[in-house]
Amino acid sequence: MSHTINLTKTAGGVAVFLSLIPWYSFGLLNTDSMPWPFLGYIFFLLSLNNPIKIPKNFMIFFGILVLGIFIALFVSKDLLDQNIFRSLYNYMGVVVFYVGFYNYLQKYGFPTSIFVVVNIIWLLFGVLELFFPEIASIFSSARNEWGRGVTSLAPEATFFGIYLFFSSWLIISGNNYKLDKGLRFLILLNIAGIFFLAKSAMLAIYFVLSAMIFFLYSYLKLRWSKKVMKQTIFVGAISFIGITVMFQTQQGSRFVELFEQIQRDAGIFTIFSIDGSLNHRLEHLVYSVHGSISNFLIPAGFDSFARLKDIFDPAYDYFFFSAIPSNKIMSWNGDWLYQLGIFGVIFLSYLYYVSSDGTRLRRAELLLLCILLFSAIPLAFPLVSMLLALFTHQFKERL
């Protein structure tokens, strides 16, 4: 009995697989961002027999994005600056990841099995790195220090945590919040992996923000249903057990030291003044937003962000101490706001609009996503675009 290989479905599956290991170099390149997910989705879109599907009015807003890019290029002084090429790839990557995964979902539905397999691979390599730290350098340009978490298939521990967070979110939302026991167990493993493997302080802030949005969504209208109460008790119990075990087993780690510092100084903002990594990330968030407002949302171009440090440091009393001036903006939203100005705002607003079905749950998810994207999530990280594509697909399915 012969089986015919579906080239389009295979290409789509490979594209999804590659997008879930966005930092894996295959031993060919020595950069943080890899082009394989971009090339995978391009090949998948070219292999489609039917016309590429896009949300209504997408081409209009894509045209606005392209116009913004041309204006940003025009105001840039050094057209050979390497950040220009990186930014052009990143913006086109957001579009290709979004359109590519949207078309995959329209044709084949959510690929739970691919997500689960790749997620398990990430966790296995994270555990393996605990015992054989040198293995990390085989898969990515990783760096690791004592007291910090493992990197698995990412270049740094925080990105490992970001992958686990967004992979969990996609799996949960892709299955319409109806998870079987296996998927629930995998999500619990991801949470454990974030705290005990990645040990990322930034991801701890993600969880705080997620908890705040969850409680606002659950209790804002005072819907005290049994389901909500059970979920609250379950989340509270898991959090209490996890934090207790973490403090007992991770003494001396950077992760625990930061939390102990917060307790001593009675303020979460304190960690931004003592931790160089968080200080660096906060600087890029603040300066990109402040810079975009100072420019009245006029595109600032691709080679001017590094100069903001000398301009803004006195205004912030030299609070930001660890960053080396760079045109690479470590904030997903900040990148759009500063470099593309109003054109970036319009395009992102459109993506959020077509991703919202008007339900309280989706609005809560988009609010959380919008807040998190001000943090140091790389613009080339495919899972953000894939999450928005999933929301858009689910909205269109309900129409």
Image (cartoon, grey):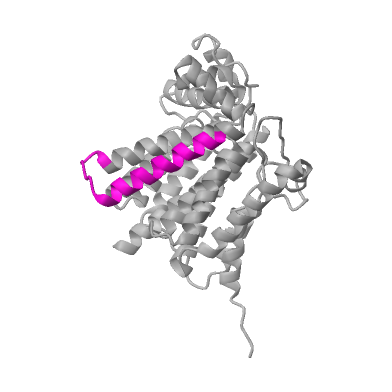
Q: Which image quadrant: the N terminus?
A: bottom right
In percent of width and height, residue 356 lies at 33, 50
Q: Main secondary structure of the magenta part?
A: helix
Q: Residue at x 65, y 32 (%)?
A: 148
* Nearest to the observer: residue 1 or residue 207: 207
Taking the view exactly as shown, the residue that stands out farthest to the left is: 222
Q: Is residue 43 above or below residue 376?
A: below
Q: Residue at x 65, y 44 (%)?
A: 154
In the visual, does 324 lie left or right of 194? right
Residue at the spot 55% in from the left edge and 59% down from the top edge: 116
> How far from the left and from the top, in percent, is residue 342?
41, 34
Residue 361 lies, with reference to residue 332, above or below; the image says below
What residue do we see at 45% from left, 43% from top?
238
Q: Start and end of the magenta stretch?
A: 219-246
Reply above or below: 9 against 378.
Answer: below
Question: x, y percentage for residue 340?
Answer: 48, 35
Residue 232 lies in the magenta-colored region = yes
**317 is within the stretch colored magenta:** no
Q: Nearer the viewer, residue 322 or 355?
A: 322
